[in-house]
Image (cartoon, rainbow, N blue to C red):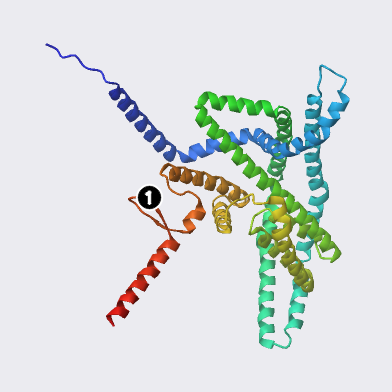
Amino acid sequence: MRRRFNWDKRYLYWGITAFCVIAASLLFYFAVSKLSVLGGALSTLVRILAPFIWGLVISYLLSPLMGVVERRMFLPLSRRLYRKSKKNSGKGFARAMSVLFSEIVLILILVALVYLILPQMLGSVQTLIQNSGTYLDNLSSWASGLFKDYPLLDQYVGNMLESFNTNLGNWVQTTLLPQLGNLVTSVTSGVYGVAKSIYNLVIGIIVSIYLLNDKEGFIAAVKRLSYSVFSVEAAERIRVGLNFVDKTFMSFLNGKLLDSLIIGIICYIVCSILQMPYTLLVSVIVGVTNIIPFFGPLIGAIPSALIILMVNPTKCLIFVIFVIILQQIDGNIIGPRILGNSTGITGFWVIFSIILGGGLFGFWGLLLGVPVFVVLYSLANSLIVKKLKRSDLPWELKEYKELEYIDPSTLQVVKKASVRKEEIARERAVKGQERTQE
C-alpha cells in the first residue's frame, strides 16, 4: 500500500529560504566581480540624471528660505489682497511669489560670484604668479636683513629661499606652462564641460521650481509610498528617521554656510582696513575653508598667510594674529549662536568623522562627514538604548559614569561610591583585627 506524503509548510519555508540565500550569494558574487561595470553604469545614470540631482539639491537648500518668506511676507500680503475673495484664499499666489523670490536670490548669488568675485580672484591669482619672483626676492632680502647678526642662520635661510625660488622656476617651466599649453589645446572639451554644467544648472533651477511649488504634494506621495510598502510601525520609524536626517543636515549646512559667509565678510572688511595684499582672494579662501569643521580655519589660514608673506612679511604676522582672534570669536561667539549644538557629539568624534570622511571622499567627506556621522551615531545610540531598556538595564550615559559593575545574577547596579565604602570598611576591619592581635 502506497504511503501518502504529508505536506508540511515548513518544507516550503525552508526551500524558499535556501533559494533566497543562494540567489543573494550569486547576486553578491556578480556585483563584486562586475564592480567596475556597475560603477560605470552608476556613473552614467548619475550623469544622465544630473539636472534632477541639481534640482533636488537646489530645492532642498532653498526650502527653508522659501518657508520663511512665505510665512512672514507673502501669506500676510495675499490675505490682504484676497480678503474680499471667497473662492481664492491667496495661498497659490503666496507660494508662487515665495518660490520666485527664492530663485531670484539664488540667481543673484550666482551672478555675484561669476561677475564680481570670480574675475577679481582670477586677476589676483594671475598677478601673484607673475610677481612671484619679485616677491621671493623681497622675502629673501627681508630674511637677510633680519638674520644679519646670525651669519650661519642667514646663510641657511638664504640657501633655502634660493632653492625654493629655483624649484618654483623649474616647476613653472617644466610643469605649469606645458599644462597650460595642453589646456589651450583642449579648450573645446573645456567649453563643452562648462556648457554642460550651465545646462545642468538651468534645468536644475527649473526642476527646483516644480519641486518647491508642490513641496507638500511630493512629500505626501513619498508618505503614501512608504505606508503602502512597509508596515505602519516601520513606516513611522522611517518617517522619524528621515525627519531627524533632514533636521541634522539642514541645521548643519545652513548654519555653516551662514557662519562662513559672516567670517568671510569680517575678514574682507578688516583686511581692507589693514591694507592687506590680495584682500578678496584671502577673504574668499578663509570664508570657503571655514565651512570645513575644526580643520577649516587652519586649512585656510596657511595658504593665505603664505600669500601675504611673499608680499609683506610684517603684514603676514599681523594677519596670523588677526586670524587667530577671528577664529576664537567664531568658535566661542558667532558659531555657537548660529549652529547651537547641532552636532550633539563630542570633539573627539568630530575629528574622527572629519578625518574618516576626508580620507574616503575628499572634500565632500570633509564637508559632510560630521552630519553623516551624527546620523549614524544617533542610529547606533538608539539601538543601544532600546537593547538596554529591553534588558531592564540603565540606559543613560551619565548612569554609567557612576557605575562600577552590574551583578549578573540580580541585575543590580553597583556604584563606585558603594564599592569604595566597602573597601574602606574592609580596610578598617583589617586594621582593627591587627590592633587587637598586637
The answer to which image quadrant residue 72 occupies is top right
Q: Is residue 133 visible?
A: no
- Image coordinates of residue 203 in percent, x first then y, are 72, 32
Q: Name the spot of residue 364 as percent of width and height, x first.
A: 61, 49
Question: Crowdedness of circle 1 by 10 Å Cα count: few (<14), some, many (20+)?
Answer: few
The spot of residue 262 in percent (x, y) is 77, 54
Q: Is residue 242 above or below residue 184?
A: above
Q: Is residue 89 visible?
A: yes
Q: Nearer the viewer, residue 386 or 110?
A: 386
Query: With respect to residue 219, does 425 lie above or below?
Result: below
Which quadrant of the view contains residue 173? bottom right
> What is the total number of numbered labels drawn onto the structure image?
1
**Quadrant that contains the C terminus:** bottom left
Residues 437 and 427: in front is 437
Counting from the top left corner in percent of width and height, residue 42 is at: 54, 36
Quadrant for the N terminus, please. top left
- In the visual, does 315 lie left or right of 391? right
Q: Amino acid at mark 1?
A: Leu
Residue that protrudes farthest toward the left in the picture: 1
Direction from residue 430 to residue 417 in the image, left or right: right
Q: Nearer the viewer, residue 181 or 395?
A: 395
Residue indicated by mark 1: 411
Q: Residue at x 74, y 49 (%)?
A: 258
Q: Nearer the viewer, residue 44 or 88?
A: 88
Q: Residue at x 73, y 58 (%)?
A: 333
